[in-house]
Image (cartoon, helix red, strand yellow):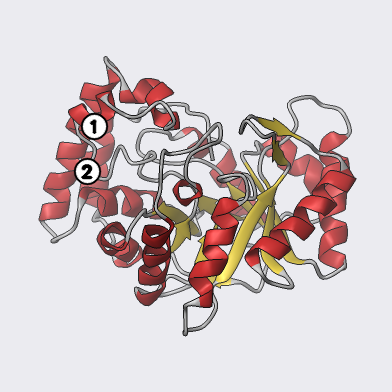
Amino acid sequence: MKTRKLGNSDLQITPVGFGAWAIGGSGWQYGWGPQEDSDSIAAIQRSLELGVNWIDTAAVYGKGHSEQVVARALQGWSGARPLLFTKCVLRWDESGAITPNFKPESIRQECEDSLRRLQVETIDLYQMHWPPEDKGPALEEAWQTMADLKKAGKVRWIGVSNFNVGQIQRAEKIAPVTSLQPPYSILRRQIEAEILPYCEKKSIGVIVYSPMFSGMLTGAMTRERAENLPADDFRSRNPEYKEPKLSKNLELVERLKEIGARHGRRAGEVAIAWTLRKPAVTGAIVGARNAKQAEGVMRAGEFELSPEEIQEIDVYSGGIALGMAGG
């Protein structure tokens, strides 16, 4: 795969990266349900075989389990080590409930814990997972701490996730922001108005998450499956997986399948390629829970939609902008 420079960093990343949210498994607030580690390892290794050169995870995914699985997958990988991106500021308790913690000592401890779980000496990209909800000094204190970790060599580059333009500007007064990780898909387009233009203007890399809307746009989601998601799968609480929105979303998937069939591609690849059409988007985070799923979506970075196909998708979807928690 061709690579793209990520923001102000020296990181050259493939258009698609492996997203390790789902492989954290169940037992926490935003889990995707049970997951076999052997399947996760196979998915990661197959993605790397297909040319993917970065993995995005977070300490909170599976209460540290995702990072551990990533490390295990790389132990059995003989090729070049992929770039490792992870995140901080979301902590958990024994029940799996998640609360943010922006205190410097907490972030420093999280960094050490992630280094240990990932079994590396340096994290390639360390990201603040969510901004504080208030306008107090927590954002600035947390970002200063991350800048200090960069100076100390614990992390190579620092970025943010789920920030708006105003929050990015606050961080920039302290230290450069290498990247932003926002949600972006055909069904969730809010970042097009302000965030993407700002990041493009400021040369901030953008790696989007949930380009397939957490599985909705893969082509594998059915009405029956959506209506029977287990209680420990966060999607079971999402309005987009329930009527009246479910029918419209499944209709959109059928249109994506039609477009993909013209190129021998799947609906999920079409959905991913759609997010990559924007020059401001450096890469898309794509999850896979087994090697077969990886086979079906990780080549999307090599696929480009025609202007006519992009227009077809936009007209059909009506430019819908929908919200969802997670990331």
Residue 30, placed above or below residue 10: above
Circle 2 or circle 1, nearest the eye:
1
Q: Residue 55 at what x, y percent from top left?
A: 52, 63
In the depicted view, which residue is nearer to us: 324 or 75?
75
Badge 2 local density, few (<14 within 10 Å), some, or many (20+)? few
Report if residue 186 is visible in the image: yes
Q: Count the numbered circles shown.
A: 2
Which element is circle 2 on?
A: loop
* 210 sits to left or right of 163: left
Name the amino acid, label 1: Arg
For the point 26% across and 56% down, the residue is 305
* 268 sits to left or right of 184: left
For the point 41% across and 28% down, the residue is 321
State which quarter of the image contains the C terminus: top right
State which quarter of the image contains the N terminus: bottom left
Badge 1 local density, few (<14 within 10 Å), some, or many (20+)? few
Residue 116, placed above or below residue 249: below
Which element is circle 1 on?
A: helix
Residue with the mark numbered 1: 225
Q: CA distance from mark 2 to mark 1?
A: 9 Å
Q: Residue 107 at what x, y percent from top left?
A: 81, 48
- Res 220 label: 2
> Residue 167: which quarter of the image?
top right
Q: Residue 226 at what x, y percent from top left?
A: 27, 29
- Res 321 label: none
Name the amino acid, label 2: Ala
* 250 sits to left or right of 36: left
For the point 78% across and 59% down, the residue is 112
Mark 2 touching mark 1, by CB under 8 A?
A: yes
Q: Residue 163 at what x, y percent from top left?
A: 65, 39
